[in-house]
Amino acid sequence: MLESLGLDELTEKVYRLLLTKRDLDIQDIADELSVTVDEIRKTFDQLAELALLRPSWESPGDFRPVSPEAGLQALLQRRQFELVRQQQQIAEAQAAVANLVSEYADHRPWGVRSSTDSLLGMDEVQARIEELAANARSEVASFMSRGAHDPRALEAAKPLDLQVLGRGVAMRTLCLESIRNDPVTLAYAQWLAQNGASVRTTPTLPVRMLVYDRKIALLPLDSADSRKGVIQVVDTGVVTAVLALFEQIWSAATPVGSAPARDDHGLSAQEHQLLKLLSEGLTDEGAARQLGLSQRTVRRMMAGIMERLGARSRFEAGLQAAKRGWL
């Protein structure tokens, strides 16, 4: 009840007891509250620091409690003064931030100058992401279009994620199915889900993408190398189309906490997508890149599919898969 004034639960109990039963010594108080003498000594120290306990004039070496009218009123006034001072500091800080934002607006490399703006280099992109995350109010939707991620990058992202989720902003993240093969990236996705985000996986994703409050989208300049920079899009039609693509993939994706489903043929969505990519003429390298897997994993998956089909070659596997309606 008095925690805002600096008294924890035990200290408040001790103070109340001292006010009503002044003949108790430290051992009596410890017995009364079923705690140790050391704990009571700590509460005495705390009460003395708060000026709620003072040396006794009548019994040198003992202490006397200060009345609530004098002691708690003084603490309350001190707390009120601190709050007023903090409010003044916040008001001064708000004015300083507003001035800095106004000064910086003319020099920052992005802004709503047109329906699309280019942000070049990772530093510029990260700075914009931080600003958009700080100002997000309703939703952040994203594609994580890589399988394994740099552990340092994932750890660096957590404080920003917590900042967004802590404000009650909805966060929906689509990851590649292949993150289930990477313990670090999977652990990050599970951490997101545990902290309030909605995370799903899907076999393939088109590009890395972020959409803030259904108004601003960040898309890569080069889908093969996201480090080159991004395009910031505010055009309503483009953002609506990007979100429609997101919703389409989201509806068929698997929650990160669930096992991937298999179709009537016993194929997982990832295996089905691998067959589709190879049937379209992609190499193992190209299919691996699309799925966020290593070429070795792709070959192992294909070997398992061939075994189930009873095929001795990939050509025969393609014929068998088509014959059975797997494609």
Image (spheres, helix red, strand yellow):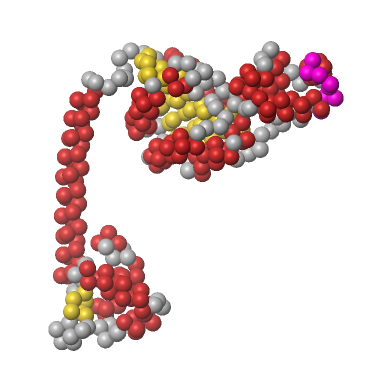
Quadrant in the rendering for residue 278: top right
Q: Closer to the camera, 63 or 152? A: 152
* x and y, in percent, of residue 98 in the image: 20, 31
Residue at 39%, 77% (x, y): give it.
36
Q: Position of residue 280 (x, y in %)?
A: 68, 13
Image location of residue 292, percent across then percent down: 60, 26
Q: Measured from the top left, where is residue 243 in percent x and y?
A: 49, 21
Q: Is residue 314 magenta?
A: yes
The structure residue drawn at horizontal position 51% and vertical position 42%, both measured from the top left corner, is 191
How many numbered marks appear? 0
Q: Is residue 281 left or right of residue 138?
A: right
For the N terminus, give its image quadrant. Answer: bottom left
Residue 89 vs residue 274, the one in the foreground: 274
Q: Is residue 110 left or right of residue 201?
A: left
Bounds of the magenta span?
Answer: 308-315
Q: Residue 239: in sight, yes or no?
A: no
Viewer-proximal residue, 152 or 35? Answer: 152
Who is closer to the viewer here, 212 or 125?
125
Quadrant position of residue 42 = bottom left
Determine whether 163 is above or below 313 in the image: below
Residue at the (63%, 39%) spot, across then down: 258
In this view, 130 is above or below 277 = below
Q: Is residue 280 left or right of residue 305?
A: left
Residue at screen point 44% across, 16% down: 221
User: Is 4 a magenta residue?
Assistant: no
